[in-house]
Image (tube, rainbow, N blue to C red):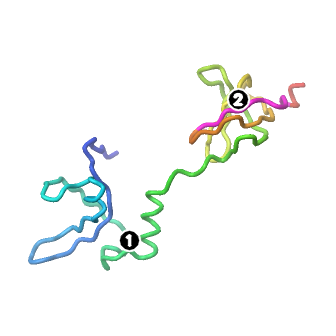
Amino acid sequence: MVEISDSLRAVFSAPVHERDGAYIVEIPSREVAHDALTVGETYRVALLNTPTSTATTGQDTPQSAQSQRERHREPPEPPVDEGEVREVTIETIGDQGDGIAKVERGYVVIVSGAQPGEQPTVEIDQVQENVAFASVVEDDPRAL
């Protein structure tokens, strides 16, 4: 595994050009505009080969531009909505004693008062970026 220094200032893709016997890496103007880099300063640079066509043309192709957008894309929206009612399977108990279920993409739903192995119907009360909180609206029919 590669260790990344806390002093990392910027990550971007850029072509390498030869000019007068030297090789030049173009730094996107946005890196200076956003204060990631300062003109006149010296930086340590790491170069990683990438299979996009930007290195040969110096211009973003639709495919490479799409790849760049995907790398900087926001995380996906949570797979549940507040007020949604659904059946979940409680997999384990959390630190506070609440049941923990996982739904699409491993998204965590914390269910107050539920026990491992139960499959209650729950209503989603609160949704956050990486976790939701739910209440049991119907107990596991197998437990009755």
Report the span colored magenta. 131-140
Residue 46 image position (x, y, % from top left): 24, 56
Residue identified by numbered label 2: 111
Label 2: which secondary element? strand
Q: Are marks 2 and 1 in contact (CB under 8 Å)?
A: no
Residue 114 image position (x, y, % from top left): 74, 25
Which numbered disc, 2 or 1, marks the residue closer to the eye? 2
How many numbered markers are drawn? 2
Judge from the rendering whether residue 59 lies leftward or rightward of residue 91; answer left or right: left
The N terminus: image quadrant: top left
Residue identified by numbered label 1: 52
Residue 69 image position (x, y, % from top left): 45, 63
Q: Nearer the viewer, residue 33 or 113?
A: 33
Q: Is residue 112 magenta?
A: no
Judge from the rendering whether residue 12 lies leftward or rightward of residue 110; answer left or right: left
Where 89 sits versus 40, above or below?
Answer: above
Q: Is residue 138 magenta?
A: yes
Q: Amino acid at mark 2?
A: Val
Residue beneath the point at 76% across and 42% down: 84
